[in-house]
Image (cartoon, rainbow, N blue to C red):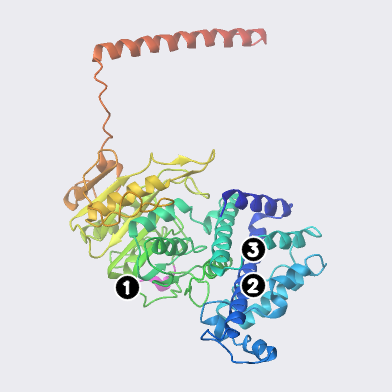
Amino acid sequence: MNADIRKTLWATADKLRANMDAAEYKHLVLGLIFVKYISDTFAARRAELTARLTNPDDDYYYGDADPADIAAELEDRDYYKEVNVFWVPEGARWEALRNAAKQPDIGKRIDDALTHIEAENPKLKGILDKRYARAQLPDGKLGELVDLVSTIGFGDDPAVARDVLGQVYEYFLGQFASAEGKRGGQFYTPASIVKTLVAILAPHEGKVYDPCCGSGGMFVQSEKFIAAHGGKLGDVSIYGQESNPTTWRLAAMNLAIRGIDYNLGREPADTFIRNQHPDLRADYILANPPFNVSDWWHGSLEGDPRWEFGDPPQGNANTAWLQHMLYHLKPTGRAGIVLANGSMSSSQNNEGTIRAAMVDADVVEVMVALPGQLFFNTQIPACLWFLAKQKARQGEVLFIDARKLATMISRVQGELTDAVIERIAATVAAWRGDSLPLPLGEGRGEGRAEGAPAVYQDTPGFCRSVTLEEIAQHGHVLTPGRYVGAEEVEDDDEAFADKMQKLTEKLGEQMAQGAELDAVIRAKLGGLGYGF
């Protein structure tokens, strides 16, 4: 979808919210996009069924039935369920809402439509947020928002509608996270970080788990990765958990809008205390847990079997998250986790002991130091941990220092470009001895086929493979900068004496300019009566 269209839609939607807080407005907009999506896909499936039921050459052909019988057959829910399309009752369909957009009770009509949709689709029970009747929008703004959402979606092809609406949903999630600042980051992990996790883990099939899934970005990116590598929707089973009820709903809608089947547990719940998937053993785990959580502990967690490498400190959940994910990993699985940089070096309250035990058990595979300013909600420097119970290179850890590789996309926001992500993923693949990954983005696969030979070598300032013995010598600190060394500087062949002459001349010029500026400042202050 054209990026300009997404920006125009966002600018219009943002203008309509007037003085409403972004955190509240988010649910109104994203809920309407979801209803538009399920209504569009329902209408497209119904049109397809009508054509097939009346086509003598089709398996669905319904004989010479009269139109009333055809209409009755179209009410069979199984026709819709078999292609993962939600049933939308007549009064809840988008056309009915759009026709009533200018009515003063449009908020109540939307809430009623959501209630009817939930009643017909058990999968959506408790997911749809019915808050439109009490929305604090100025008169007419909700109707204008309905009209705006009506413009999203192009053509009758369900696949096209799904892609367009999915892109709009994802773009709006990011924009709301930016608008909300710190609170927004609780439900949204920046796309470039998710892409990096997915590119390194390379999920292809099996069970994918995120124990703190936010709005579901890890799952969406995993499905995109699989599709780009020749797989199909459904090659992975999605398992997630989220404690925030509104964010849990966002995740369910984000996955449903893309036709991704999911299991987010019976309810929103705390992962440590009310684990929704206690028996799950996943092939891939991707997660961005909240950093340095201090109020996570509960007495029921004492002696929990998840704490294989030591009891996590009650004042910081970082090592609890790491051990929780290892516990839920299959013997052949891999996990990628975003954590604050302190997790790599802190020795407070048993953290160092747990980290040392994990390193010595050879379950830490790759460590990546990230640039600052990637997150919406915090400037705390972050890193990526990659864990595996059966490592490709036992007795070694790969360290990658990507702290200087961000591209600034605004004054305060940076990202990792696709080229940087490809470089990191290719480095990990080469180190593991895997085939090189396909390029990201447009032009995928051109010039290099997946399966090309992978050759790893240490690169000063960027990556280095380090033995467990050397890591132990450094007190089991896992900060990549400690191991990768300094970046090699290309020698310009200029003689040292000549170079020093130029530098001292330049320094002399700058000092002279500084003296002139000092004199000007003194004169200005003197003119104001503040001479010294």
**Residue 346 seen:** no
Q: Of the residues tagged 3 and 1, which is closer to the observer?
A: 3
Is 95 in front, or is 255? 95
What amino acid is labelled 3 in the image?
A: His
Q: Dot 2, how many residues are within 10 Å of its Cα: few (below 14), some (14-19), or many (20+)?
A: many
Helix, strand or loop status at disc 1: loop
Is 130 in front, or is 294? 130
Compared across the picture, whether 133 is left or right of 450 comes to right
x 53%, y 84%: residue = 57
Image location of residue 165, percent across then percent down: 58, 62
| Magenta run includes residue 209 | no
First of labels 3, 1 by sequence position = 3
Q: Of the residues tagged 1 and 2, which is closer to the observer?
A: 2
Image location of residue 121, percent across then percent down: 59, 81
- Boundaries of the magenta span: 298-305
Q: Dot 1, how many residues are within 10 Å of its Cα: few (below 14), some (14-19), or many (20+)?
A: few
Q: In the rendered image of this protein, does residue 58 appear above or below residue 510?
A: below
Is 315 in front, or is 271? 271
x 68%, y 61%: residue = 149
Q: Which residue is mark 2?
A: 39
What amino acid is labelled 1 in the image?
A: Pro
Q: Which residue is mark 1?
A: 305
Q: Dot 3, how many residues are within 10 Å of its Cα: few (below 14), some (14-19), or many (20+)?
A: many
Find residue 27 and name its label: 3
First of labels 2, 3 by sequence position = 3
Image location of residue 176, percent across then percent down: 60, 54
Compared across the picture, whether 314 is left or right of 497 comes to right
Helix, strand or loop status at disc 3: helix
Q: In the rendered image of this protein, does residue 42 appear above or below residue 287?
A: below
What amino acid is labelled 2 in the image?
A: Ser
Helix, strand or loop status at disc 2: helix
